[in-house]
Image: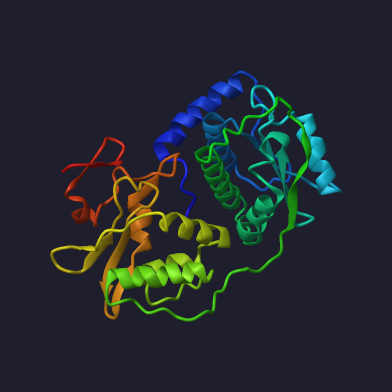
Amino acid sequence: MSPRWPSNELRRLAATALLLLAACGKPDLVEDEAGLLTRAEQERIAEFHGLLQEDYGIDYRVATVRDPGDIERAAVERFAKLRIGGEGSGGRGLLLLVDPAGKRVRLEVGRALEGSFTDAFVTYVENRQMVPFFAAGRIADGILATTELIVQRAMNARAEGDLLVGEGSALSAGGGATAAITPGSVLKTDGDRRAAGATPEETLARYFELMGQRDASPDQGLYTPQTQAMLRRWVMTPAQMDTLLREYRRCEAEPAKLDAGGRRAVIRYRIEDRGCSPWFFAKGPSGWQLDLIAMQQAIRFGRSNQWHLAQGAEQTYAFAFSDWRFDAQGFPQPGG
């Protein structure tokens, strides 16, 4: 699935804020020396990182480089030169350095973040999130997907009482990790084929099993044909699968709701479980199939990873929410 944070309307607000920051002479959040990103991709990444700064005070920069030599040393030197994590960020700085020629990527971590963004976590993010995207040539998507994990880590740290308060230093002490960008995938793509279930609940359970096995094979009977076609073009990383399972284990599902014709179904969660979006199903010849295409079109996530219905999107599955009301942004509220 695509990166979930932030929502379209928040992106527009962030874009305005970033224009104001640029006018005040603030540093660029993206430096594309290697020419890997389009202008639109650079702007989109900067919007995400601007909101990360606003919400968590984390100064996150991205740089693509040509022939940096020793990438670890280059990252430390650039971190210091740009004073990443300075100017009010309290040493909460991150630098993602991408070396396409050397097929390497490094995430450098400022001193104030080392307690939450440990080397083990950074290594996991690089190998299980960045590398699959980068190896597929999806640089911008990989950066955005990595930002999503960083946001989730910051959210979890705050929930656990770590306010990510730094000591004013903008320097890196060499914390972080480096990974090699190699072609191929670390995911299983030729595992056991899972048929559609006799009930939506059975199909969803089989899907979660696939995620637990890190099986990204698109040609599964539990997907609609349109979903299978989409997944053949998609990059699904181990980190995304791990995050999905971790988040949905925390949520309490309701019994499936079927439409009047018995051809569509929705499994939704309690309104307070706002991090767990509903699942859409279509009845196929062999059982209930996941309709991820409809989910992608109808559901968006806000900056706190809370789901809402996309404004203006066709809501084929709206029957399942007749007892809920939605606010002006599409976020669900109790009461019909």
Residue 322 visible in the displayed image: yes
Q: Residue at x 61, y 18 (%)?
A: 24
Place of residue 122 in the rendered image (x, y in percent of width and height, measured from the top left):
67, 50
Question: Does residue 64 appear left or right of residue 197 in this picture?
Answer: right
Place of residue 209 in the rendered image (x, y in percent of width and height, measured from the top left):
45, 71
Question: Does residue 69 appear left or right of residue 5 in this picture?
Answer: right
Place of residue 160 in the rendered image (x, y in percent of width and height, measured from the top left):
53, 41
Snapshot quadrant of residue 59: top right
Q: Residue at x 70, y 24 (%)?
A: 168
Q: Residue at x 14, y 67 (%)?
A: 261
Seen from this angle, which residue lies furthest right?
A: 69
Snapshot quadrant of residue 92: top right
Q: Is residue 231 above or below residue 36?
A: below
Seen from this angle, which residue lies furthest left?
A: 260
Place of residue 251 in the rendered image (x, y in percent of width and height, measured from the top left):
37, 54
What is the quadrant of the C terminus in the image? top left
Residue 223 visible in the displayed image: no
Q: Nearer the viewer, residue 309 or 88?
A: 88
Q: Nearer the viewer, residue 117 or 21?
A: 117
Q: Nearer the viewer, residue 98 or 162?
A: 162
Q: Is residue 160 above or below residue 294?
A: above
